[in-house]
Image (cartoon, rainbow, N blue to C red):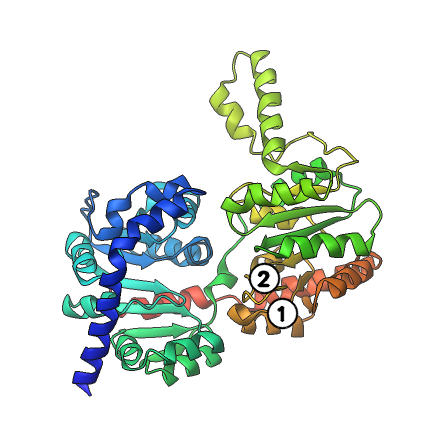
Amino acid sequence: MCENVSMSRNIYTFLLYLLLPLTPLKLLWRARKQPEYLAHWQERYGFYKQKLNKPVIWLHCVSVGETRAAEPLIKALLQQYPNHQILLTHTTPTGRATSQQLLGNTVARVYLPYDLPFAVKRFLKHFKPVIGILMETELWFNLIDSCQQHKVPLLLVNARLSEKSAHGYSKLGKVVQQGLQGLTAVAAQTAQDAARLQGLGATNVSVIGNIKFDVAPHADAVIQGKLLRDSLGSERPVFLAASTRDGEEALILAAVAQANIPNLLTVIVPRHPQRFDEVAELLKKNSLNFVRRSSLLKKCVEKREREAKEDATQTVQIVRQVADDAGDKIIVNPHISFVLGDSMGEMFTYYASCDVAFIGGSLLPLGGQNLIEACSMGKPVLIGPHTFNFEQATEMAITAGAAQRVQNSNDLAQHLQALFADTDAQQAMSAAALRFSNESRGATQRTLSLLSQFI
């Protein structure tokens, strides 16, 4: 048995070494759209300049979604362990930028190295974490093995595993079983997630719930949302298509056209910032009048700077901070039918400003995106048929009356027509969304209790 497991991991590692010469090309390719991929590239091979002088609690958050999900846990750790340093590792530049935006200098951040023995050993020797915490579905088998060798407790928390992903992992055989058994503990979101992980070999698994329900809107989210809504036109119906993925925007445009709701303003926020320009080109190609969210912010900055010149007591720095008021009194032209949400870190603001929200990644077989933030803002939610990455939360929201599932673009159009014609139905879904969100909280404290056993 041990020989078979060792052979499996050796094959896995050998394949990674074969791919190693291609990794610089991969970074260069991605840097075409996101130049940030070329920054800190040495960290991806285990070379770090940053020194930390306190005991390190390390969390790995791949990208934006995991980073946002981890925010309440990170803040709880900062409060409970003030004599420790929180280190976040990321895989994408957008994940790294999100942690900077949410947490500033209260945490340290670097890239997690590629899952090669020499790189992960360098990482562990450099930072010497007292505990490692992997968010959601991150399984890197050489990293897990190195943590065992260095006696670093490694936990998988807020763990989720779709049926599709479980089937894919099962094809890797013993290497997955050994990897899961190498984890110190697993905190699963749901009983279904726990069962799939145990079926692949995980031990010490508990069901703790979804930390994402504890992600609270920022204190000024409602105010910022109202200011944005005022700039969009407070009397206009507003539909938000949030976290859209490649190929979905065309379907959403078709649904909006078919729904034919008078004076409707549609806000489209692509999931990935590198696609902002691509979606702008799609809107131009369809001869649709639109404005970019960033241009509203720019106009607001210019307006505030003009005002500052008339008031010598204001500085440009203060002006730019105040300009985050979401475009105060910069009103969208009533002939504009679309807003391209090309700003970062404003999802709660977007949700607060809309009447109805559609959650992207779900019209096409991409697994869906998180609907919890929309529910926490009390918004009626529409979501497509493909939600295998968030199946439990989606079904719970539908059962609670907070969300409705649509099957395709035509169905989306019909649901939009029905909701915008019935304010009572909107209000009922809004109230259900808030109840659903409030009743599902508490996973952060349960996770913190689990982690305290190993820190």
Q: Which is more toward the observer, 311 or 281?
A: 281
> How much space separates mark 2 and mark 1, taking CA atoms?
8 Å
Residue picked out by circle 2:
371
Quadrant of the frame with the N terminus: bottom left
Report crowding for label 1: few under 14, some 14 to 19, many 20 or more residues within 10 A (C-alpha). Answer: many
Place residue 155 in its image quadrant: bottom left
Residue 237 spot, x, y in % from top left: 78, 48
Q: Which residue is drawn at 57% across and 44% down?
A: 278
Is 175 on the left-hand or right-hand side of 358? left
Give the answer, above or below, for where 144 lies relative to 102: below
Q: Residue at x 60, y 48 (%)?
A: 269
Is 291 on the left-hand or right-hand side of 70? right
* Label 2 SS: loop
Give the answer, above or below, for where 36 lies relative to 330: below
Residue 188 spot, x, y in % from top left: 42, 74
Q: Identity of the amino acid at label 1?
A: Ala
Q: Residue at x 76, y 53 (%)?
A: 256
* Label 1 SS: helix
Q: Which is more toward the observer, 52 or 279?
A: 279
Q: Do the residues labelled 2 and 1 touch (CB within 8 Å)?
A: yes
Give the answer, above or below, for where 139 lies relative to 80: below
Q: Is residue 80 visible?
A: yes
Is 342 on the left-hand or right-hand side of 75? right
Q: Identity of the amino acid at label 2?
A: Leu
Residue 116 spot, x, y in % from top left: 22, 61
Quadrant of the frame with the C terminus: bottom left
Residue picked out by circle 1:
397
Q: Residue at x 49, y 18 (%)?
A: 315
Report crowding for label 2: few under 14, some 14 to 19, many 20 or more residues within 10 A (C-alpha). Answer: many
